[in-house]
Image (tube, helix red, strand yellow):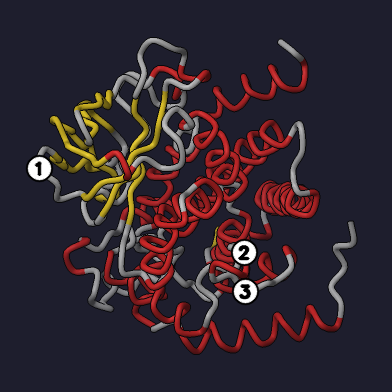
Amino acid sequence: MDLTFSSEDEAFRAEVRAFVRSAVPADMARRTRQGYHPTKADLKLWNEILYEKGWVAPHWPKEYGGTGWSPLQIFIFEEECAAADAPFLSYFGLRLIGPLLYTFGSEAHKKRFLDDILAGRTFWCQGFSEPSSGSDLASVKTTAILEDDHYVVSGQKIWTTEAHFADKMFCLARTDASVKPQKGGLSILMFDMDAPGVTVRPIITIDEGHTVNEVFLDAVRVPVEDVLGRVGQGWDQAKFLLGNERVSNAQVPRSKRDLALLKRIALAETAGDAPVVDLPDIRQKIAQLEIDLYGLEWSVLRELFSGGGAKSQSVASGLKILGSEIQQRLSALAADLIGAKGLAMIEEGTAQANDLPGDSPDYVAGLAARQLFLKAASIYAGANEIQRSIIAKQVYGL
């Protein structure tokens, strides 16, 4: 694997950087930088900007709307988007259900859904986690019972990100309770979020933001043709999806942006008359974070170039663990350097305004809230404890 940057790669980076930094609206970049939970309006606008450019789904195959870029070019693109404080586009259409559809879906489903996902006309949410089954998808209790030409779906989903503004859900449910989930008992069904029987209730997280929800499904009728792929294929589809998601959840571009912010804070904040970066323990912590982050970056690139393999799921689990821990370390150190000032917040209802509290630097508002929210990074997308169990089973046979 050759990860050196050629002159063509550097020219590509310059092209991407010039476009992205000119295309991201300043107020959108400010909201991203200050850690606001993304609004549908921001996600939709940035999706539309990239769609018009032809860059909205570089990781998709070219035949379905991808760019044909190399893995290294895709990584450069994502890094430049993060560095420009562009919002991270909604995962659930572009990263999750989209790849599921072009990998497992029928031609009819591809024609029906893929273009709307690319264009940002349809937003999706993921109905996997439940109150008693988060990372352990084999214990999903939501049922889908066949009645004539419909499945009747009943159950409860929780921690459902963006369900409050999603148009559709892809939902993991038991279609056959007589067999194990791993042997064909699970399927993924797709339905509208305004369908009769769907109720969404907000969950306000510790940072006082609204991104996640609980969703109640009360006899939601889903046509049989809206099962994704084959009935009973849900376990294989979920494993495919979670492998993709956990590599993405290493969040290297986002963490590189946060590392740059951390360095800026360390230079700007003072201890006595000197910047805090001059304190030996602070300099050491920042250096160790940078070393660990660049090690993670190379590991992600190696996995992307390798194309996976027998141990791909365990590798993805390891990347997810390390990525989430680095995110938490970065945000915790930034909050420590800011101290009580980091408690300054802007109400989400006024997020469109550009006003900052008092004379605080622009990196202050929302910093503590972000540190609180990232406590969940080691839980969402599969808790780190579950990821360690996957590694122990696949690598060591435990």
- The quadrant in which residue 165 appears is bottom left
Q: Residue furthest front?
A: 148
- Which numbered disc covers residue 61? 2
335 relative to 48, above or below: above
Three-letter amino acid code of the residue under disc 1: Pro
Element marked by disc 2: loop
Query: Does residue 322 appear to the left or right of 134 in the view shown?
Result: right
x then y, percent, for residue 3: 85, 63
In the image, 168 versus 385, the foreground residue is 168
Q: Residue at x 28, y 65 (%)?
A: 40
Q: Which residue is mark 1?
A: 196
Three-letter amino acid code of the residue under disc 2: Pro
Q: Which residue is mark 3?
A: 67
In the image, 89 versus 110, the foreground residue is 110
Few, some or many residues within 10 Å of mark 1 (<14, 14–19, 20+): few
- Compare marks 1 and 3 and give the one earlier in the sequence: 3
